[in-house]
Amino acid sequence: MDTYDIMLYVSYALVGLGAVVSILLPLIKSLDDPKSLLKTGLGVVAILVLFFICYSISSNEVLPKFEGEPFNLTPQMSQMVGGLMITTYVLSIIAVVGIFFTEINKSLK
């Protein structure tokens, strides 16, 4: 079992290292071209605005069976989960529609 534990912690470390590198290297590269950093910032702001819109329209209702011991779901947690789910749905629909229109546009050229 010790080998499994060690490998599990090594995999956690590698995932963390990959996350840090995937965030830092584009930031270092964008120092040469600050306009690309502005485009990235606008994309992040757009996703945050979309999330807050979806969060505000999601319900904070918790069914009685989820208020109990195994889940301990609060209205704030319910609204956060609802907002994240609606955001995922909206982004998925945007992606599918974008793929559809891109394929139609490529077939017409």
Image: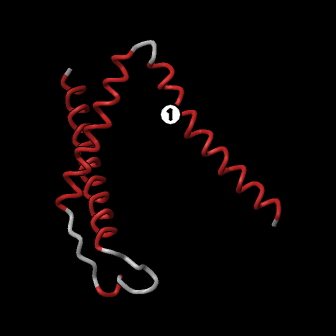
Picture layout, residue 18 above or below residue 106? below
Instruction: Give the x, y percent position of residue 59.
Output: 20, 68
Q: Is residue 2 left or right of residue 88?
A: right
- The residue drawn where x is 30% and y is 59% is 85
Looking at the rendered image, the quarter that the N terminus falls into is bottom right
Q: Which residue is mark 1?
A: 23
Tell me the colour scheme of the image: secondary structure
* In front of the other: 32 or 96: 32
Q: Secondary structure at mark 1?
A: helix
Snapshot quadrant of residue 3: bottom right
Snapshot quadrant of residue 79: bottom left
Q: Is residue 19 left or right of residue 98?
A: right
Structural crowding at the residue carrying mark 1, measured as other residues with C-alpha within 10 Å and reported as few (<14), some (14–19) or many (≥20): few
* In front of the other: 52 or 85: 52
- The residue drawn where x is 49% and y is 19% is 29
Instruction: Give the x, y percent position of residue 68.
Output: 39, 86
Snapshot quadrant of residue 101: top left
Looking at the rendered image, the quarter that the C terminus falls into is top left
Q: Residue furthest top?
A: 32
Q: Amino acid at mark 1?
A: Ile
Picture layout, residue 38 above or below residue 51? above
